[in-house]
Image (cartoon, helix red, strand yellow):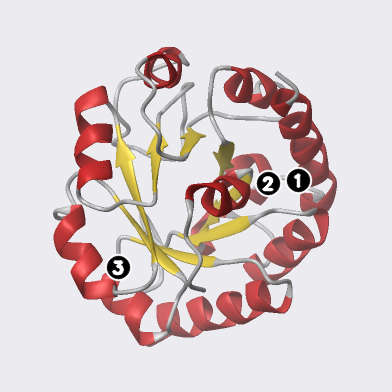
Amino acid sequence: MTNFNDQYIRDLLKVYFIMGSNNSVLDPEHVLTEALKAGITVFQFREKGEEALTGSEKTALATKLKNKCHAYNVPFIVNDDVDLALEIDADGIHIGQDDGKAEAVKKKIGNKILGVSAHSLEEVKAAKIEGAHYVGIGPVFPTKTKKDAEPVRGTCLLQELRQHSIKIPVVGIGGITSMNAEDVMRAGADGVAVISEISLASSPFERASVLADAVKRGMQK
């Protein structure tokens, strides 16, 4: 993957699914397969928290899920773990504000997608200057998935970014469902990122399909 212009990244961000082995009751590979069939546009492997896999088990699952994504021509992003991303040749890495400087990470990963979590206008500007391809803004709504989540931002920061004409692809995250995804898109996001909305669904295919439809409606601004 070499063409990382803004429009390419915006297209990737539309339906952004995040999951680790501990985010789903069903088999993670099954959940991801169903989500891929339903049209998710990018997947992030986030193996963190209680009962998360480590070592060779984590690497094995990451490799299996990456191969599944590539079978559907969907990029595979690793959360935080640069060494893992390089080891399995992932398509990109997503880091938080406590995971090191984006500029330093970008030098390590070379020609891979770089996403950065941001919670203020200043953090977005810094991520852009340091070479991030996109930023994740959130939590937009209350979320139970991330125990140490930042305060809820609502859609205000998304709207603020657009008002300041900051040209960097943006994905909203945190408490987003098929019921509110349209609002997030209309506020200025290029896509929505979800975990439990798909990972905990009894039918990941159906839930991902409904979410994708909500995103499409929100794009008709």
Residue 154 sits in which quadrant? top left
SS state under label 3: loop
Q: Which residue is drawn at 57% across and 54% down?
A: 8
Q: Do the residues labelled 2 and 3 touch (CB within 8 Å)?
A: no
SS state under label 2: helix
- List the residue tagged with mark 1: 208
Cα gap from disc 3 to disc 1, whole angstroms: 26 Å
Type of residue at label 1? Answer: Ala
Nearest to the observer: residue 159 or residue 136:
159
Dot 2: within a 10 Å radius of its alpha carbon, few (fewer than 14), some, or many (20 or more) residues? many
Q: Return the disc, 2 or 3, that comes first in the chain's sequence.
A: 3
Image quadrant holding the C terminus, namely top right
Nearest to the observer: residue 115 or residue 174:
115
- List the residue tagged with mark 3: 81
Residue 28 sits in which quadrant? bottom right
Dot 3: within a 10 Å radius of its alpha carbon, few (fewer than 14), some, or many (20 or more) residues? some
**219 displayed left or right of 137:** right
Q: Do the residues labelled 1 and 2 touch (CB within 8 Å)?
A: yes
* Viewer-nearest of discs 2 and 3: 3
* Viewer-nearest of discs 1 and 2: 1
Type of residue at label 3? Answer: Asp
In this rendering, the count of numbered labels is 3
- List the residue tagged with mark 2: 198
Q: Where is residue 66 in the image (x, y as percent from the top left)?
A: 56, 76
Q: Residue at x 44, y 21 (%)?
A: 158
Q: Where is residue 7 in the image (x, y as percent from the top left)?
A: 56, 47
Cα gap from disc 1 to disc 2, whole angstroms: 6 Å
SS state under label 1: helix
